[in-house]
Amino acid sequence: MTEGADSRGTGDEQVEAVVCGAGTAGLSAAAMLSRAGIRVRVLERAAQVGFSWRRRYDTLRLNTLGWMSTQPGLHVGRRYSHFPHRDEWIRYLERYADHHRLQVRFETEVSRIDRGDPGWRVETSEGPLRAPHVVLATGYDHAPFIP
């Protein structure tokens, strides 16, 4: 059987885990799964990591100290402000993905996730994936709410 092929002959790509979202939570989850030896596919509907951060106003800052916002496996370091601003945080997320060698499939939308046999079937704009584990890290504020 070739890598990525489904043993049932469905043509669905098989991975060990799918992480939906390449923001802070998704990258952290993917990094720690990878560290545990699990093959992870990260799916991101935008063209870059941390897309929600990129759409915010340019003077936005974290409301926590940078060293308190460090993600697992890569310290923020002293190169950023005490309260990192938007662009510093985006650079950190890019560095984080590079540091952990995360394979992110950009411009890939997830349209549906169904319970499969075994695990999950994830319908994407690039074709279906099958995985025993799926992490949804799509955030809750990617679409602004304007009353």
Image: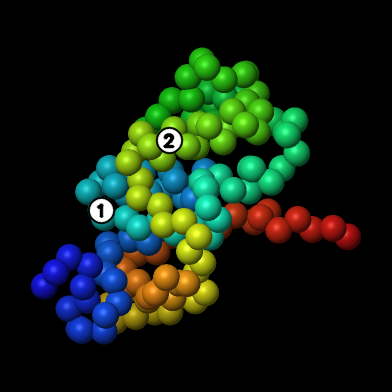
Q: Residue at x 40, y 29 (%)?
A: 74
Q: Is residue 118 left or right of residue 107?
A: left
Residue sitting nearer the eye, 12 or 24 = 12
> What residue type is disc 1 on?
Ile
Disc on res. 99: none
Give the image location of residue 87, x and y in percent: 62, 31
- Quadrant of the image containing the C terminus: bottom right
The numbered dot on residue 96 is 2
Residue type, label 2: Tyr
Q: Residue furthest top?
A: 78
Estimate the x, y position of residue 101 in percent, counting from the top left: 32, 41
In three-dimensional space, the C-alpha distance between marks 1 and 2, rounded to whole angstroms, equals: 18 Å
According to the picture, the residue beneath numbered tag 1 turns out to be 38
Residue at image location 66% in from the left, 55% down from the top: 142
Task: Give me the residue at 51% from left, 46% from top.
Answer: 49
Q: How many residues crowd mark 2 within 10 Å: few (<14), some (14–19), many (20+)? A: many
Q: Secondary structure at mark 2?
A: helix
Q: Does residue 20 appear anywhere in the picture?
A: no
* Circle 1: element type: loop
The residue at 66%/28% (across/down) is 85
